[in-house]
Amino acid sequence: MAKKERILIVRADKTRDESRMVSLQERLAGEGFEADLSGAGEGALEPLLSGRYDVLLVMHRPPGADGHRILQHLKETGKEVPVIIIIVPLDEGDVSPFLREGAFDVIRETPDMSFAGQVPHCVRRALGERRLKEERREAEERLARERVISEATLQSVVNGIVFINTRGIIEKTNRTLDALLGEGVAPVGEDICGLPADHPVRRLFLKPVELGACWEIRACGDRDCPLYGRRDRICWVSGVPCSRCNGEEGSDRLHSMLRCPVYRMAYEKFYSEPLELDYNGRFLYVYRRNVIGEGGVLIGEILDFIDMTAERDYQEQLRLLSITDPLTGLHNRRYILDKLEEEFYESRRYERTLSLMLIDIDDFKRINDTFGHPAGDEVLMQLSGILESKRRKSDVAGRFGGEEFIIVMSHTSCQDAVIMAERLREQIGTCTFTALPSSLFVTVSIGVASLAGTMRTTVDLLKAADSALYRAKSKGKNCVVAL
């Protein structure tokens, strides 16, 4: 059952016009309202302030029931209740002061009670307006709560967020973005076209052009293309127009550019795949998303920055573990073989020189047997340090297995490789190894091989280097042999 709206009729005194007030009360009851007669004067406001009544009817009879004072009292107490003032027919004064003070309406009382017919209609209008105000207030409160929640959510997410409205203005950012890019790097209120050319946000908006979707790469010579000669116009590479470009229709130009298959391919990739950004010492994934409002209208774009630095570092650690010898820190056999194959076919294709050095520690088993495997490991690590420090930047050194090491030398002839091998052998032979007595010196035998026209695969080159190493061992060790 629907709740009846409650009306309070405030009268000047209990004895005057009692029958008229009862008649008005009955008229309201007949219209479906629950109407009560108050006590006398302003003292009758006490039940009103309890919140039980929805509309207040004030029989304006100063000083017993002064509508002005009642309106002022309600304003001071913060009570928002529609007030309808009923004035005596002889009162010819201006009713506008009541309305300015907050009364909903003013009705003139008539001797024949005909005014009572106006009251239910006026009450309904007052109740309707009150409901609208309450709904508006609830909507505003709900919107305020949603804004607070939205702002709290925005500031608490682990991703950095930039919202750019349809005027090309940075409208919203969060604390995470400041942590990722640096405080103030993306200032709210800034026009993206006014950002420096190397600014990360500007660079991200120009990314489709960098990916190859422009007149230069397509080489189509189409001067009607909005990008022709104007790589700096952000509004031409984005659905968000640029205010600096005098409101030129960015979306229309974008649709025009999307007719170019090269640009369309880059643009679709731009929105479907994360962009990679190295900035402020961090490695970031950046997703770009359109924000669509009601009716499918574009209201802006979001750049979503995800910090992938830890993930990248972890993946790099895994990569290094997969290609590194755990004892010596040099490249392992698998990496060396992959690198050798890459250099082998590159050298054959471009007719470049390529040499290979196989290094084996002489009598290493005797070191292990005499001083123990820990001492042998120390020798391997110290020798690896020598190889790493003496190699050229273009050379790749690695542990090939056991006490055998390898150095791949691109752009190096056999003669130059032998010179470097001799220099390396002499340096190792004069080095003091901390795990061994100072009187004991470590020597190495080195086999050198260079790419020849008869070699078809890396196996041929490795066999030649291995044969050279075998001859060095046969000649008495501690020497260099080249094939």
Image (spheres, rainbow, N blue to C red):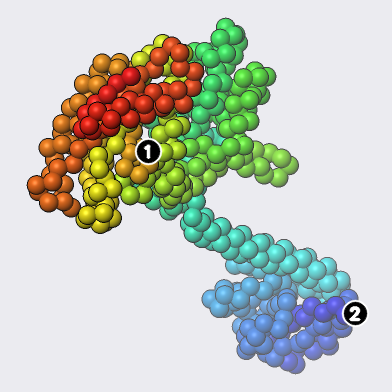
Percent of width and height locating residue 471: 30, 27
Left/right placement of residue 283 relative to residue 442 reads right
Secondary structure of the residue carrying numbered label 2: helix
Q: Which residue is mark 1?
A: 400
**Quarter-of-image position of residue 191:** top left
Which residue extends farthest bottom?
15
Percent of width and height locating residue 219: 56, 9
Which residue extends farthest right?
30
Residue at figure coordinates x 68%, y 39% from the top left: 297
Residue at figure coordinates x 49%, y 51% from the top left: 159
Q: Which residue is mark 2?
A: 30
Query: Dot 2, crowdedness within 10 Å: few (<14), some or many (≥20)?
Result: few
Instruction: Name the quarter where the N terminus is drawn.
Output: bottom right
Percent of width and height locating residue 463: 42, 26
The amino acid sitting under disc 1 is Phe
82 shown above or below 415 = below
The amino acid sitting under disc 2 is Gly
Left/right placement of residue 191 relative to residue 48 reads left
Depth check: 91 or 28 in front? Answer: 28
Depth check: 469 or 96 in front? Answer: 469
